[in-house]
Image: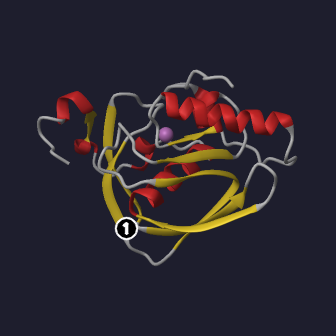
Amino acid sequence: MTIWPILKMGDPRLLTGAKPVTEFGTPELKALVADMFETMEAADGAGLAAPQIGVPLRVMVFGFNQNLRYPDAPPIPKTVLINPVIQPVGNEVDESWEGCLSVPGMRGVVPRWAKISYEGLDVDGNPVCAEATGFHARVVQHEYDHLNGILYPMRMENMAFFGFIDAMNAVYSD
Ligand code: NI
């Protein structure tokens, strides 16, 4: 397994849409997913999408028991989701702080669907489907956006709520 360098905002590869996976259960796909989990965990990420390591495929991983970057977040089951589809459940929107391994050291307030259902495939092509609320729903929507070349600052509605974590910790206790 390999820890990959994570591309940072400004790299054009983060702005290109990713392509669906067509072959499942291959050694290449299994290695990619194992590397993505290892890379995410080495960076204390809540999730990671393949375009963030320069692989333009619709593959995302997320989940943790405890997360150093989001110490108040409840555990999320470790999940790989390939060729995902997301649907909002209801029309409630949450606004909350969010960060990204590709935008290091920063946080911003981003509106997201409060409740979603999602489905996709695992590494062997078996169906995965679940409902999520709160931070879990936020992480899935954030990683899904990466597959479409969208970074969270592009979703923000008020740039007053965007800044460096070390500067804001003194201001926001959240
Ligand atoms: Ni991200």
Category of crowding for the residue at label 1, using alpha-carbon neighbours closer than 10 angstroms: few (below 14), some (14–19), many (at least 20): few
Tell me if 63 is positioned left or right of 71 in this view. Answer: right
Q: Position of residue 64 (x, y in %)?
A: 48, 46
**Camera-nearest residue between 42 and 107:** 42
Residue at figure coordinates x 37%, y 67% from the top left: 93
Which residue corresponds to mark 1?
93
Viewport quadrant of the N terminus: top right
Tell me if 108 is positioned left or right of 2 in this view. Answer: left
The image shows residue 14, relative to residue 121, as above or below, that is: above
Q: Quadrant of residue 131?
A: bottom right
Q: Position of residue 23 (x, y in %)?
A: 87, 46
SS category of the residue bearing label 1:
strand
Q: Position of residue 25 (x, y in %)?
A: 85, 46
The residue positioned farthest toward the bottom in the image shown = 90
Q: Position of residue 70 (x, y in %)?
A: 34, 43
Q: Look at the numbered disc 1 and say if its residue's Cβ is closer than 8 Å to ligand 1.
A: no
Q: How is the image coloured?
A: secondary structure
Tell me if 20 is positioned left or right of 92 in this view. Answer: right
**Camera-nearest residue between 14 and 53:** 53
Residue at figure coordinates x 12%, y 35% from the top left: 170
Q: Quadrant of residue 13?
A: top right
- Which amino acid, mark 1? Val
The residue positioned farthest toward the left in the image shown = 171
Residue at figure coordinates x 44%, y 34% from the top left: 44
Q: Quadrant of residue 86?
A: bottom right
The image shows residue 85, relative to residue 166, as above or below, that is: below
Give the total of numbered labels: 1
**Camera-nearest residue between 168 and 158:** 168
**Camera-nearest residue between 68 and 145:** 68
